[in-house]
Amino acid sequence: MRRTPTCVLSDAAPPDVSDGHAVDRFVEIGSLTKVVTGTALARMATSGVVGLDDPLERWLPATPRTGITLLHLAQHTSGLPRLPPRVSRRDPYATFDRRAVHQLLSRLDAIAARPPGRQEEYSNLGYAILGEALATAAGTTYEELVTEYVLRPLDIAEVTANPDPSRRLPATGRFGRPRRPWTMHGAILPAGGLWATPRAAADLVVRLLVERRLGDPAPSWQTAGTLRWHNGATRDASVFAGATDDGRWVLIHRLNGAPEETDQAGVALLERRRTAS
């Protein structure tokens, strides 16, 4: 059996690492990237660079008038499907670059499964398009805009699309060989392509949800009662991050583990803290 390196950080105890995980090595955070993208949107809206209700075609003129707004994209209510067309199983986003995004824009009305604003449907495609719109509005790259609007104000440095290979912590296969990660630094980056050290990902949780350094949490966070949370998963990595209104928080990252088990572990840890208090 393959090992499942695990890193748990929380308000309740010192970091707990096992099977070779580490708090200071870069790991894939998958869709936890969406929290960074959504926070950038909120900050850019507060600064007047964009409006939450801006129609998508304002920033990406090739888009027909679909009624989709930036907020629809952030809240997964755009009506767009979960994935871009024609992704592969082996490396789903390897060919999904900026050119591919712009080729889709002119036919978004045909791609959308339903009118915007009616129903929530989780969409990686929607966040890829949101990231492209924000980069266009900012006149810069996605990485530069999230550094300016999110990471630098939070004093967080260990989040990037391209970490130094010597500091990456890859998953390993059955014979202990490092597995090659998916290609996520193209157009899918705003939806799930960032890498972070676990300690930096934990800082994101604390500074955004507990300390509220940048104001109210972004619309990208999921909610369940008093819990705000988000998860993320790639082929070989999974993460759960969440915090409650009373200041309890947790960040769990695992390699080679089933994503649903990572989620369950995070929720269970927060629940044990609630019942113990």
Image (tube, rainbow, N blue to C red):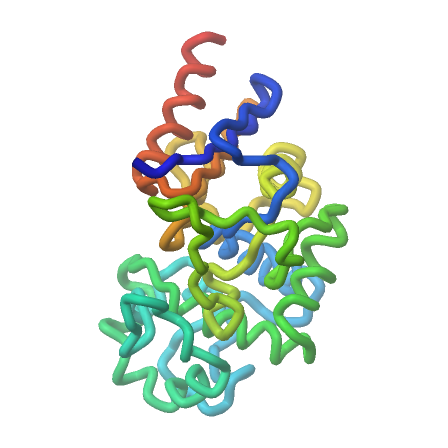
Tell whether 111 sits left or right of 277: left
Residue placed furthest toward the front: 175
Residue placed furthest toward the top: 276
Any part of residue 254 in sight: yes
Q: Quadrant of residue 134?
A: bottom right
Any part of residue 31 in sight: no
Q: Could you say which is closer to the camera, residue 74 or residue 31?
A: 31
Tell whether 17 sits left or right of 44: left
Whether residue 30 is situated above or below residue 69 in the rendered picture: above
Q: Quadrant of residue 123?
A: bottom left
Q: Position of residue 108 (x, y in %)?
A: 34, 83
Query: What's the residue at 41%, 15% (across, down)?
Result: 272
Query: What's the residue at 37%, 45% (across, down)?
Result: 175
Query: What's the residue at 55%, 82% (across, down)?
Result: 59
Query: What's the residue at 54%, 65% (across, down)?
Result: 52
Whether residue 244 is situated above or below residue 154 in the rendered picture: above
Q: Could you say which is closer to the camera, residue 65 or residue 166?
A: 166
What is the quadrant of the N terminus in the image?
top left
Q: Quadrant of residue 31?
A: bottom left
Tell whether 182 sits left or right of 135: left
Q: Position of residue 217 (x, y in %)?
A: 56, 45
Q: Position of residue 270 (x, y in %)?
A: 44, 23
Tell whether 196 sits left or right of 144: left
The total number of labels drawn is: 0
Q: Position of residue 69 (x, y in %)?
A: 45, 72
Q: Could you say which is closer to the camera, residue 250 or residue 28?
A: 28
